């Protein structure tokens, strides 16, 4: 199996995106840390949150701008089931990513994705690239298309 960063790079290439993965040398796990490392605003950071269906154990990916909070009620309506925090081992097993490095693209298996519409107001956003200190810059529309994300009202 290819490494996490290589999978992200290949997924971007297959989606017609040219990205440059940057290893920051310091953690980019939180939106604030990532914004500081990238030299951008917090809202230009794409948060990748994964939840697990209580009934199906299916995973769901929610992409939000850095300062937003996910509305669990709205997310559950989109998922069609009650959601809970996903088990970190399950996330790694099904996506190939560890928490803190979950990318919107490059998962080892498809995960239904939903994205906050506010991400589209930015010229560029920064997303995790498969490791706790790896990020890449992208045009939000292209990134959400590559993630096969449904744009929806998911923020509180």
Image (cartoon, grey):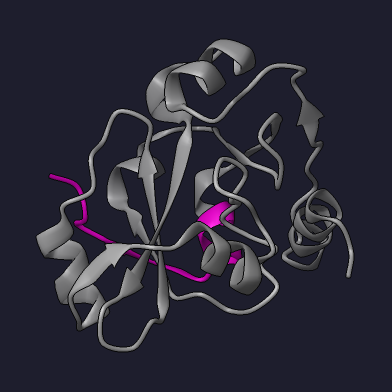
Q: Does residue 37 lie above or below 43 as drawn?
A: above
Q: Report the residue at 74% width, 20% height from top.
A: 24
Residue 146: quadrant of the picture: bottom right
Rendered location of residue 110, percent (x, y)? 58, 79
Rendered location of residue 105, percent (x, y)? 63, 60
Total numbered labels placed on residues in the image: 0
Q: Does residue 1 lie above or below 105 as drawn?
A: below
In the shown orientation, is residue 89 left or right of residue 12? left
Residue 25: quadrant of the picture: top right
> Is the N terminus in the top left, top right, bottom left or bottom right quadrant?
bottom right
Q: Nearer the viewer, residue 54 or 12?
A: 54
Q: Report the residue at 61% width, 51% height from top.
A: 103
Residue 152: quadrant of the picture: bottom left
Q: Report the residue at 51% width, 46% height from top.
A: 140
Rendered location of residue 117, percent (x, y)? 30, 50
Judge whether residue 5 is colored magenta.
Answer: no
Judge whether residue 146 is colored magenta.
Answer: yes
Question: What range is drawn magenta here?
Answer: 142-156
């Amino acid at each position: 199996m290819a490494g996490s960063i290589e999978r992200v790079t290949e997924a971007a290439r297959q989606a017609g995106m040219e990205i440059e993965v940057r290893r920051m040398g310091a953690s980019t796990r939180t939106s604030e840390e990532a914004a500081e490392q990238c030299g951008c605003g917090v809202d230009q950071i794409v948060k990748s949150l994964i939840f697990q269906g209580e009934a199906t154990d299916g995973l769901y990916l929610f992409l939000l701008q850095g300062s937003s909070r996910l509305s669990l009620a709205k997310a559950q309506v989109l998922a069609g089931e009650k959601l809970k925090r996903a088990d970190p081992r399950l996330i790694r097993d099904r996506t190939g990513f560890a928490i803190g490095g979950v990318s919107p693209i490059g998962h080892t298996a498809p995960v239904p994705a939903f994205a906050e519409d506010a991400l589209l107001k930015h010229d560029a956003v920064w997303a995790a690239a498969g490791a706790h200190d790896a990020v890449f810059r992208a045009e939000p529309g292209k990134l959400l298309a590559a993630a096969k994300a449904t744009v929806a009202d998911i923020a509180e």
